Amino acid sequence: MNHTLCALSGLLAAFVLAGPAFADPDHRHTAAVPTLATQGKTTVSIQGNTVTLTIGPVDLPVEHAGELAASVPIYYFRLPRDMYMTSFKSAVFTKDGRSLPNNYLHHILLINTDRESVSCPGEPLFFAGAGLEMVEARLPAGYGVKLGKGQKLMAVTAFYHKVPPTKDVIATFTMEMAPDGVPVKELDVYQVGVNTVCYSKFGQRGPDQTDEGITIKPGVTVLSAPLKFHMDGCVKFAYPHGHDELVLITLDNKTTKQTLLRTVPDVSLDGTLIAFQPHQIYRDPRGFPVSTQDEYEISMVYHHPLQDPRVQHGMGNYLLYMTPGNCGS
C-alpha cells in the first residue's frame, strides 16, 4: 500500500495545510482538503498533567478525489494555565478497543496559532505531530515546550482514505505536561526537510514536488537539500518523519564536515515503514549545536521496487527541539 503521509510536510508540508487556514484561525476548512463534515468530532480532556485529544469515532474509508487524506474539521482549544509539554504520542483503534495498523492514521498536527515559527517566519508554530511512524516522543528530562495559558492551539487530523471499510475508528493524541512547580528549560521547535516544509514557500516547489512529497523514481533515489538555520541553538531531541520505502535520513554540517543525525527506519520486507525505533531517535540533554553561520545539508534515501508501477512520493524531515544559544550556555 502506498501510504502518503502528507501534511506540514514534513510536517507542515508533510502535513498539508493551505495558507488561509493559518491566516484566519477561525477558518474551519481549506478548499484543497476534503473534510468529514458530519463525522470526526474532536474533544480535549485534561486529567492532572495529561492532555488528550480524542478524534472520532469515524467510519472509514471516506471517498474523495485525489491522493490526499480526508481531514476532519480543524479543532481549536486553549489550555487553562501555562503548561510545558514533555512528551507526546498517538494511537488509532476502534471504539471497542481493537488496535488498528499505523497506516489508518494519516496525520495529527498540533499548531500554536499565537506563536510564530522560527524556521518558517510569518507562519504559526508547528510544535508536535504524528503520522505513519507513530513513535512516542519523550523529551530529555528537565526540558519542555511551553504552551501558554489561553493561547489558541489548533489540531489538524486526517485518516488515510485507502484503508478497508472500518466502522467507529478513533484516534488519540496524548501530551504529558511537566508537573506544576517543577523547573523546566524551554525548547524552541524547528522543522527541516528535504522537501519544502514552509507552506508559504509551496509556490516555489519544483514540478516533481507536491503536497504528497517528492516523486520517487524506481530503484534507489538519493535527494538532498541545502539548509541554513535562522537561529543558533542546541538540539536536544529530533523527531524524524518519512514515508514507505524510506531507507535513510541524514543531517550534515557541511562547514565543519560533521554528520549530526543519521536515522534508519524499521521497515517490512516490502519497504512499508513500521516505525522509527527508540535507538534511532536522537535524544540527548547534552545536545549538538547548530549555527546561523554554518552551511548544512539534509538528505534522504528511498528505494522503490523496479516492478512496482505505482507512483511513490517521499519526504525526509526532522522536527528539532532545541534551546536557544550555544550548548552549555
Image (tube, rainbow, N blue to C red):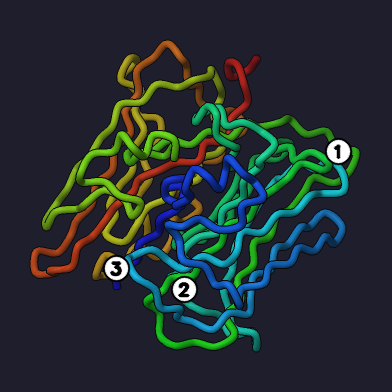
- Residue 2's disc number: 3
Secondary structure, mark 2, is helix
Q: Position of residue 328 (x, y in %)?
A: 63, 17
Residue type at mark 3: give it.
Answer: Asn
Which residue is more in the foreground, 307 or 23?
23
Residue type at mark 1: give it.
Answer: Val
Say few, some or many: other residues with alpha carbon within 10 Å of mark 1 (under 14 / 14 to 19 / 20 or more): few
Q: Say whether marks 2 and 3 touch (CB < 8 Å).
A: no
Looking at the rendered image, the quarter that the C terminus falls into is top right
Q: Residue drawn at (78%, 34%), measured in percent from left and top?
A: 184
Q: Is residue 170 above or below residue 328?
A: below
Mark toward the viewer: 2 or 1: 2
Mark toward the viewer: 3 or 1: 3
- Residue 182's disc number: 1
Q: Which residue is mark 2?
A: 104
Tell whether 149 sits left or right of 277.
Answer: right
| Sooner in the amino-acid sequence: mark 2 or mark 1 | 2
Q: Position of residue 144 (x, y in %)?
A: 70, 38
Q: Is residue 74 above or below residue 297?
A: below
Measured in 3D between alpha carbons, the distance from the residue under mark 2 to the one under mark 3, in whole angstroms, is: 12 Å
Which residue is more in the foreground, 230 or 288?
230
Q: Residue drawn at (33%, 43%), measured in percent from left and top?
A: 249
Measured in 3D between alpha carbons, the distance from the residue under mark 2 to the one under mark 1, in whole angstroms, is: 37 Å
